[in-house]
Image (cartoon, rainbow, N blue to C red):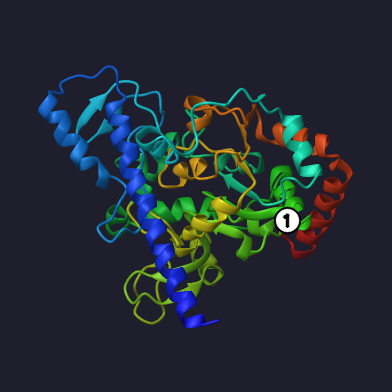
Amino acid sequence: MNWRLHFSVSAGRHLFRSANFQRFVGWRNLWICTRQLHYRSCSASTACRNLVSLGSVFQAPNRIFLLQRPPETNTEKLAIISGERFQGARTFSLSSAPMVFFGVGRGGNSGGKVKLTLKDVTELIQKKKCSRIVVMAGAGLSTPSGIPDFRSPKSGLYDNLQQYNIPYPEAIFELSYFFQNPKPFYMLAKELYPGNYRPNYAHYFLRLLLDKGLLLRLYTQNIDGLERVAGIPADKLVEAHGTFASATCTVCRRSYPGEDFRADVMADQIPKCPVCTGIIKPDIVFFGEELPHRFFLHVADFQMADLLFVIGTSLEVEPFASLAGAVGSSVPRLLINRDLVGPFAYQPQYNDVAELGDVVSGVEKVVALLGWKEELKELIKKEAEKLDAKGK
């Protein structure tokens, strides 16, 4: 085989698919706009201008994925699109765009098929009919460990940032504000830095999936590093919003292990580069920054997946949220979450299963149906002993 030609073709396909993914994001936003039944202050000509501009909402000029801040914290609130407000706007999965415009992809008719249940999904795993599981996880995976999520009313981090004296909550993750005043971010980093919390039952369930050879990849929005602490290796992880495991100088761009600056963060000091004295920033993805290169693994992973778990996420932050619609239309999707979110709420399929309520309780039901209770109990005990020995 001509390996040089093979890798050239593979790279070309990768770029082509990622570009198509971005184009569908544009179609997604166009569809949001056209689906609004109630709107205000929007003439026909204004609407047309807005439609033309929507394709660039999530897309940088060089087609690099950027982390996008949602305009509202609740998908049922007014959505702000290109300066206009539309009532009832809601998020829309990427896979629905080709279905709507071209009649293909996930969505629509179940073909009279019987709707799946949680027991059906666990039986598929037991019978090895689902052995390439992709997991999408959000802050709800870590809240049982004591880490507050970002958007829950009253209890979320964004509702409790008064002590940081910032103009608005999201400023703490915006580069422009960070360069003006990095102190609020490092105050929050001190709270979230790995080592302050331990993995919980749900983390170790994902570890057990790995141990059984069932975990294809874990895509996480979390920056707490608890997936790593639970024993999930870096090659099985896509930390879509970054990690504290590494850090970069904002001036000379030298890279450092994140642990090298833990002492500074814990001492309420802003880490400085020992070479150029520039500010050291953990490799957490701020709004408007490029997502990690590993995020592009979704191009292959979601096509290979035969089961998708979505655990503890609001599915509001793009482009992560749109991955929920990237699996094939025949692939079962299991949501373990407090609320129905994303396509589970507005575009449910016969092979979608939603286990609503407390995340740990939902995972416990899955473990019980799989018959893994004792096995998981032993794993948690063994890992806890390791952490105790390390003094964490």
Q: Residue at x 47, y 25 (%)?
A: 346
Q: In the rendered view, would you say 143 is above or below 180?
A: above
Q: Position of residue 355 (x, y in %)?
A: 66, 28
Q: Residue at x 19, y 33 (%)?
A: 83
Instruction: Name the spot of residue 254 as percent of width and height, x first.
Output: 40, 77
Q: Which residue is mark 1?
A: 210
Q: Nearer the viewer, residue 340 or 382?
A: 340
Residue depicted at x 49% and y 56%: 299
Depth check: give the residue in front, 317 or 115. 115
Give the image location of residue 54, x and y in percent. 24, 40
Q: Up-down: is 167 above or below 87? A: below
Helix, strand or loop at disc 1? helix
Q: Nearer the viewer, residue 153 or 54?
A: 54
Q: Eyeballing the image, is 108 above or below 371?
A: above
Which quarter shows the N terminus?
Answer: bottom right
Is residue 269 in view? no
Identify the residue at image location x=63%, y=60%: 236
Quadrant housing residue 24 = top left
Question: Residue at the top extreme?
Answer: 38
- Decide which of 29, 82 is in the foreground and name it: 29
How busy is the neighbourhood of tag 1: few (under 14 within 10 Å), some, or many (20 plus)?
some
Left of 355 or right of it: where is 385? right
Asked if 256 appears above or below 15 in the picture, the reply is below
7 to the left or right of 201? left
* Residue 361 visible: yes
Quarter of the image for the C terminus: give it: bottom right
Determine the image quadrant of residue 368.
Answer: top right
Callout 1, which amino acid? Leu
Q: How many marks?
A: 1
Residue 371 spot, x, y in % from top left: 86, 39
